[in-house]
Image: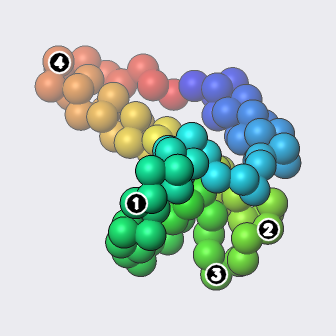
Amino acid sequence: MKKGLPFSIAVVVLAGAFASQNPDGLEKVAEILGFAGKATNRWAIMFAYRIHFLGTTKFSAILAGICGVGIIYGLFWVCAGVFSRLAGKKSTVA
């Protein structure tokens, strides 16, 4: 866990730096089939892999990725703690 988080953040930073501005596969298929405009854009903090109040910069994509990694690791941490308590053992996640 201690080595995984920095590695995951490094991967996100590197991947975000090389991320393409072109539509991903699902968006491209929706454009080809003509239903891309029918999608509803609901307000979300990290919609389309970006933090929109920061604009559509690479920094926005990288920060959204780091937030996503943090959310996943946080959920893992909470679930591991709950499951270890249910099993009657002390948590060994750290």
**Secondary structure category for the residue under label 2:** loop
- Can residue 56 be seen here? The reply is yes
Residue occupied by mark 1: 35
User: Disc 3 marks which amino acid?
Assistant: Phe
Mark closer to the chain start, 2 or 1: 1
Residue occupied by mark 4: 87
Q: Is residue 35 above or below residue 77?
A: below
Rendered residue at 40%/60% (across/down): 35
Query: Between marks 3 and 4, how big is the CA–CA gap?
Result: 43 Å
Question: How many marks do you count on the picture?
Answer: 4
Mark 2 surroundings within 10 Å by alpha-carbon count, few (fewer than 14), some (14 through 19), many (20 or more): some
On-image quarter of the N terminus: top right
Mark 1 surroundings within 10 Å by alpha-carbon count, few (fewer than 14), some (14 through 19), many (20 or more): few
Q: Position of residue 16 (x, y in %)?
A: 77, 47
Mark closer to the chain start, 2 or 4: 2
Rendered residue at 36%/69% (across/down): 38
Is 66 displayed left or right of 89 in the figure? Answer: right
Residue occupied by mark 2: 57
**Secondary structure category for the residue under label 3:** helix
Mark 3 surroundings within 10 Å by alpha-carbon count, few (fewer than 14), some (14 through 19), many (20 or more): few
Q: Position of residue 28 (x, y in %)?
A: 57, 48
- Per the rendering, the mark at residue 53 is 3
Query: Between marks 2 and 3, how big is the CA–CA gap?
Result: 10 Å
Q: Position of residue 89 (x, y in %)?
A: 25, 18
**Secondary structure category for the residue under label 4:** loop
Mark nearest the camera among 3 and 4 is: 3
Query: Between marks 1 and 4, how big is the CA–CA gap?
Result: 48 Å
Mark closer to the chain start, 3 or 4: 3
User: Disc 2 marks which amino acid?
Assistant: Thr
Query: Between marks 2 and 4, how big is the CA–CA gap?
Result: 45 Å
